[in-house]
């Protein structure tokens, strides 16, 4: 959808927001009403990156609940590693890339040649968009994370959008039926963004085993760390079995690295060599970031604490919505989607006036709000503002 987050561009404007809003001018209200038109979808309100790119740099929010960030990170170990890395940050961090790859390979049980690093998962999604858009149509769910399909469309690629199921999950059966001789890639975000739903693991694994024999499958697992047992759900097993499957991962979510920028892809070595033609790879990652990732990878104490805090804030949000008479889609991530009872663009604008940033979508003949899970004080700010509008 046209108002989806662009992970690659968000870093350009993320520094504009922190703390509590001090004002909301008429000019900013005007920005909220300005539509963005995709070349293959309908018009929607400005994305948060586009909004903040035009907003006054002094504009800040009490509750920044529009970018699915982890407000509890990065970890203390990551911060310590960043500080220690500064003294030698004049050096290229060649010697450190292998350390992180070794850690990932050992934990996931894959070969080092099956892993590539980059500055977040966005450059890897962009590489896939550029490569596969040349060779045929890209099939994906709708709505889903739009970065890869949007970039492919912008360079002339064909996108086949497949509606979600009645319970707002990726419709694997319908996607499989949409595949033909002109399909170049299947892209699946699981858990899905913006609906926060996850598909049945056994069904997805069987889907990938069948479909990857015909066409490559890219599984975006940006939010997998929010699931109870990521190791049981991940499609990295498909890569280990030799299937033509790519798995994109990021440190931007549960690890709290959205502003630090690091991610990776697990795939067959030949596929990684092909996609590497479109990206800078490890050379795009800063020395402090790579050191922080090494220090915090699989830091269960921090990750479990962040998960517990996220669950507490999510429970508070669920209770707030129920008290105000609103339904919601049960979430498997750090954000929640719920149908609105007013125009989505107006709702986002009114919430922003109350110092709370959220997102909206239009699908299934409804206006929806997507609210990210923040600290408890941010969720309380959301609740206070929401009650004034509900």
Image: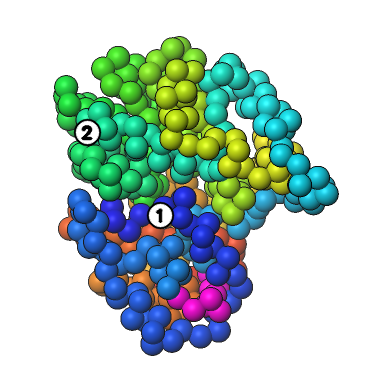
Whole-percent x, y for residue 216 in the image: 33, 23
Of the two numbered discs 1 and 2 on the same chain, state the one appearing first in sequence: 1
Which residue is found at the position 37% from the left and 47% from the top? 147
Which residue is found at the position 34% from the left and 32% from the top? 131
Q: Which mark is residue 137?
A: 2
Any magenta on residue 59?
A: yes
- Which corner quadrant holds the C terminus? bottom left
Q: Secondary structure at mark 2?
A: strand
Q: Which mark is residue 5?
A: 1
Instruction: Judge by depth and name the residue closer to the eye, 141 or 181.
Output: 181
Whole-percent x, y for residue 93 in the image: 71, 37
* Quarter of image, res 241: top left
Numbered range of the magenta stretch: 55-63
Q: Which mark is residue 149?
A: none
Which residue is found at the position 28% from the left and 48% from the top? 154
Query: Residue most toward the top?
Result: 241
Instruction: Judge by depth and name the residue closer to the eye, 41 or 238.
Output: 41
Q: Secondary structure at mark 1?
A: loop
Label 1: how many Cα within 10 Å (few below 14, some 14–19, many 20+): many
Any magenta on residue 343?
A: no
């Amino acid at each position: 959808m046209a108002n989806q987050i662009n992970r690659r561009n968000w870093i350009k404007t993320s520094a504009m927001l922190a703390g509590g809003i001090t004002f909301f001018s008429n000019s900013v209200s005007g920005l909220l009403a300005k539509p963005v038109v995709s070349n293959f979808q309908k018009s929607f309100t400005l994305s948060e990156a586009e909004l903040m790119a035009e907003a006054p740099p002094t504009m800040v929010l009490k509750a920044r609940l529009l970018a699915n960030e982890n407000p509890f990170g990065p970890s203390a170990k990551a911060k310590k590693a960043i500080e220690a890395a500064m003294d030698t940050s004049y050096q290229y961090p060649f010697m450190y890339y292998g350390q992180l790859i070794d850690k990932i390979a050992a934990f996931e049980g894959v070969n080092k040649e099956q892993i590539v690093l980059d500055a977040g998962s966005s450059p890897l999604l962009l590489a896939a968009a550029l490569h596969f858009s040349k060779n045929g149509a890209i099939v994906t769910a709708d709505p889903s994370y739009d970065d890869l399909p949007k970039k492919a469309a912008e360079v002339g690629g064909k996108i086949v959008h497949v509606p979600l199921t009645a319970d707002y999950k990726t419709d694997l059966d319908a996607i499989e039926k949409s595949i033909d001789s002109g399909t170049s890639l299947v892209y699946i975000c699981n858990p899905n963004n913006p609906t926060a739903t996850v598909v049945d693991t056994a069904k997805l694994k069987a889907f990938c085993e069948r479909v990857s024999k015909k066409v490559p499958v890219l599984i975006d697992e940006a939010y997998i760390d929010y699931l109870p047992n990521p190791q049981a759900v991940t499609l990295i097993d498909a890569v280990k079995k030799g299937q033509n499957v790519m798995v994109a991962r990021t440190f931007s979510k549960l690890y709290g690295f959205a502003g630090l920028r690091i991610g990776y892809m697990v795939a067959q070595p030949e596929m990684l060599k092909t996609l590497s033609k479109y990206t800078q790879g490890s050379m795009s990652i800063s020395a402090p970031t790579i050191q922080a990732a090494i220090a915090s990878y699989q830091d269960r104490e921090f990750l479990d604490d962040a998960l517990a805090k996220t669950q507490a804030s999510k429970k508070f949000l669920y209770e707030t919505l129920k008290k105000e008479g609103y339904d919601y889609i049960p979430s498997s991530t750090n954000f929640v989607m719920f149908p609105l009872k007013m125009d989505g663009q107006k709702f986002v604008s009114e919430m922003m006036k109350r110092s709370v940033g959220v997102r909206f979508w239009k699908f299934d003949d409804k206006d929806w709000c997507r609210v990210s899970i923040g600290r408890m004080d941010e969720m309380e700010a959301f609740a206070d503002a929401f009650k004034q509008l509900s």
